[in-house]
Image (spheres, helix red, strand yellow):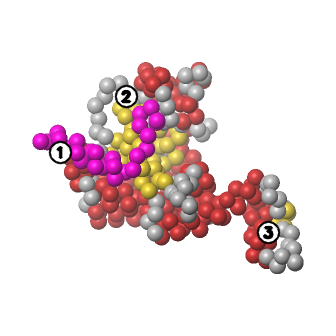
Amino acid sequence: LQITISIGVAEFNRKSGDEGASLTAARMACEAAKDHGRDRIEVYDEQNQSIIRRHDDMQLVAQIQQTLDSDGFALMAQPISALGGKRDVPRYEILLRMKDDAGSAVPSSAFFSAAERYQLMPQVDRWVVSKTIASLMSHPEVVHDAGAVFSVNLSGQSLSDDDILEFIEDEISAAGLPAASLGFEVTESAAVSNLAKAQQFIDALHEHGCSIALDDFGAGLSSFAYLKNFAVDILKIDGGFIRDINANRISESMVAAITQVAKVMELETVAEYVENEKTRKLVAELGVHYAQGHAIGKPIPLEEVLRELGVQVKESTA
C-alpha cells in the first residue's frame, strides 16, 4: 500500500485559550490540503478561497441538518412551457429553498456546496421526493384530472445510494400516486460518473412509469457518445449554451445539433435559462420542444401552483 498524508496547520494562541477554534481551523486546513491534491501540508489562511468555502460549508451543514429535522425547507415549482404552439399537460420542475437562522434566503449554490461536501444530498433528495409526493396527493384533482408532471432533481450522491430506488418506489406505491405524475432529473455528469447504477436507476423508474430527463446535457465532452447508453425521455440542454445563444453562433450550432440528435432518437428537449422573448423565439425556431426560465415563469411555492391548477380543473369541469 502506498500511504499518503494530508496535514493542516493552524496557529494556536495559548493566551486566548480557544482550543476549539484552533482545532476547527486546523481541520479546515487539512481538508484544503485534500482539495489541492493530498499528500501535502496546508497552513490555515483566512484568504485561501478553498478554506473560505469550507468554513462557509461547515457553518451551513448544521443548519441544513436542523432544517431537515424540522421540515423547514420550502418546495418551489417553476413552469416548463411547450413551444411551437404545442398543447401539453402542465409541467414543472421542483426546486428547493432554505432560509438561515435569521430568516434570510440561503443561496442555492452555497446550500448545495455544503450538502454535497458533507454527504447530505441523499437525505435532502429523500426529503424532496417524500414531500413532493405528499403535496401532490393532497390535491388529487390535480394529479388525476390535470395530468400535471412534476420533476424532481436527484444528485450524483443519491445515484450511488443503493437504497434510493427502493425508497422512491415505496413512496410512490404507499401514496397511490400515478407514476406518470412524477419525473426525475439527473445531471449528465452524475449519470456518467455512476454509469452502471444510473442505467439501472433509469430503467427501473421507466418500468414504474416515471419520466427521466438528462439535465445539463452538452456540458460534457462526450455527451453524444454517452447518450446511447441511457434510455431517457428528455434532454435538458445545458444552460451555458442558452444564456448567450443570441450572440454566439457556436452555442446556436450546439443547440441545433442537440435538437437534431434528439429528434432522431425521438427524445424531447428543454431549453433552460430562457430569460427573454428573443431567446424563446430562437430556441423554438431551432426545434426545441420546451422552454424554462424567467421569460416563461419564475419559481413559486408548490402549494400555490397546486391550488391554481385545482381551480383550473374545477372551472374546466364546471
The N terminus lies in quadrant: bottom right
Question: Which of the two residues, 49 or 74, is positioned nearer the viewer here?
Answer: 74
In front: mark 2 or mark 1?
1
Q: Position of residue 284 (x, y in %)?
A: 42, 24
Q: Please say whether residue 297 is one of the residues in the magenta stretch.
A: yes
- How far is disc 3 from disc 1 in space, using C-alphas? 61 Å
- The residue pinned by badge 1 equals 314
Count of numbered tags = 3
Is disc 1 placed on a helix, strand or loop?
helix
In front: mark 2 or mark 3?
3
**Amino acid type at mark 1:** Lys
Mark 1, Cα crowd under 10 Å, few <14 / some 14-19 / many 20+, is few
Mark 3, Cα crowd under 10 Å, few <14 / some 14-19 / many 20+, is many
- How far is disc 2 from disc 3 in space, using C-alphas? 54 Å
- How far is disc 2 from disc 1 in space, using C-alphas? 26 Å
Q: Say above or below: 170 vs 255.
A: below
Secondary structure predominantly adopted by residues drawn in magenta: helix
Q: Which residue is drawn at 81% across and 66% down?
A: 8
- The residue pinned by badge 2 equals 83
Q: Which residue is drawn at 42% across and 50% down?
A: 76
Q: Position of residue 302 (x, y in %)?
A: 37, 51
Q: Position of residue 151 (x, y in %)?
A: 39, 48
Question: Which of the two residues, 222 or 121, is positioned nearer the viewer here?
Answer: 121
Q: Say above or below: 174 vs 241.
A: below
Name the image quarter holding residue 148: top left
Is disc 2 placed on a helix, strand or loop?
loop
Image mark for residue 26: 3
